Image: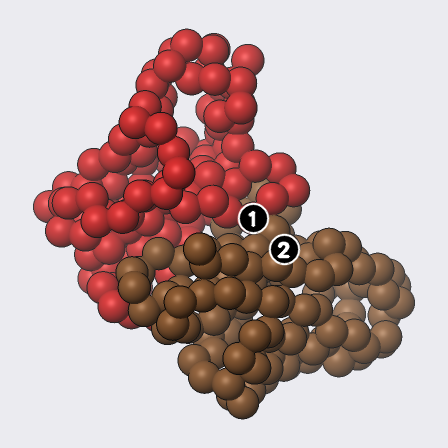
Chain colours: A brown, B red
């Protein structure tokens, strides 16, 4: 069964304090791994898609990396507006459905 | 290019009632998926429709059903509502075999 586990569940950082969020996954043939950002009461907002081990993607202060077993979302010098829940999800080659982890709630203190 | 639109944004229903939630897909997207997101949890896959046919379903009972229309808009119907059905219901659209979904803002359902 496809599974996604995210850690930590919650993370509080000072503004400017860099850190990484982890996403461990088990999937029978990876089609894609996704990172989404979700603000309270809103739908997930797409950030990145990674397709194969060794791939990296960057957007502003965020950088996503992928290995065969896990993905990391690195946040460099975060700002308070980066506070949100970050969701990791995988899509297998068997079907189109996307399986999500429970997310990491990130809070950046000014 | 319009995004994914869901209605209503909020809804309160009584246990045992039935509810219909609606979703308009992003222009050109013919695949729609529905997710249930309980508070503090990740979205859970309910089912997916492609060209008006259900082509994938998660671990949800038959009282959760759906429809997709020729214009690719979609409905999620839930019968015999239970208190545990209280959640944010998310609709997402995509192209088949495409990578990633575009999500709507969701419908917050509260069952009392």
**Mark pair 1, 2: CA separation:** 6 Å
Could you tell whether B76 is left or right of B41 in the image? Answer: left
Subunit bearing disc 1: B
Under circle 1, the secondary element is loop
Q: Nearer the viewer, residue A91 or B86?
A: A91
Q: Which circle marks residue A103 in the picture? A: 2
Query: Do the residues indicated by labels 1 and 2 lie within the same chain of the protein?
Result: no
Q: Residue furthest left?
A: B70
Q: Which circle marks residue B42 in the picture? A: 1
**Depicted B49 relative to depicted B59: above or below:** below
Q: Residue at x 45, y 84 (%)?
A: A52
Quadrant placement of the C terminus of chain A: bottom right
When asked about the image quadrant of residue B29, the answer is: bottom left
Residue B8 screen position, x and y as percent? 40, 31
**Depicted B13 relative to depicted A34: above or below:** above
Residue A19 screen position, x and y as percent? 79, 74
**Depicted B7 relative to depicted B93: above or below:** above
Subunit bearing disc 2: A
**Pointers 1 and 2 in contact (C-beta within 8 Å):** yes
Q: Residue at x 75, y 80 (%)?
A: A76
When asked about the image quadrant of residue B79, the answer is: top left
Q: Is residue A59 visible?
A: no
Please state the total of marks drawn on the protein image. 2
């Amino acid at each position: 069964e496809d599974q996604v586990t995210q850690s930590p569940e919650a993370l509080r950082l000072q503004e400017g304090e860099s850190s990484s969020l982890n996403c461990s996954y088990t999937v029978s043939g990876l089609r894609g791994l996704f990172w989404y950002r979700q603000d309270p009461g809103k739908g997930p907002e797409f950030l990145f898609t990674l397709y194969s081990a060794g791939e990296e993607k960057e957007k502003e202060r965020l950088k996503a990396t992928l290995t065969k077993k896990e993905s990391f979302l690195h946040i460099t010098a975060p700002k308070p507006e980066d506070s949100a829940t970050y969701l990791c999800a995988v899509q297998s080659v068997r079907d189109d459905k996307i399986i999500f982890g429970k997310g990491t709630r990130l809070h950046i203190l000014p | 290019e319009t995004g994914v639109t869901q209605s209503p944004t909020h809804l309160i229903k009584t246990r045992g009632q039935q509810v219909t939630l609606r979703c308009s897909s992003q222009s050109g997207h013919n695949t729609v998926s529905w997710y249930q997101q309980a508070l503090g949890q990740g979205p859970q896959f309910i089912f997916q429709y492609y060209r008006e046919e259900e082509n994938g379903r998660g671990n949800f009972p038959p009282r959760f059903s759906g429809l997709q229309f020729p214009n690719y808009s979609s409905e999620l119907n839930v019968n015999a509502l239970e208190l545990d059905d209280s959640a944010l219901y998310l609709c997402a659209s995509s192209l088949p075999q495409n990578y990633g979904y575009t999500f709507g803002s969701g419908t917050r359902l509260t069952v009392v």
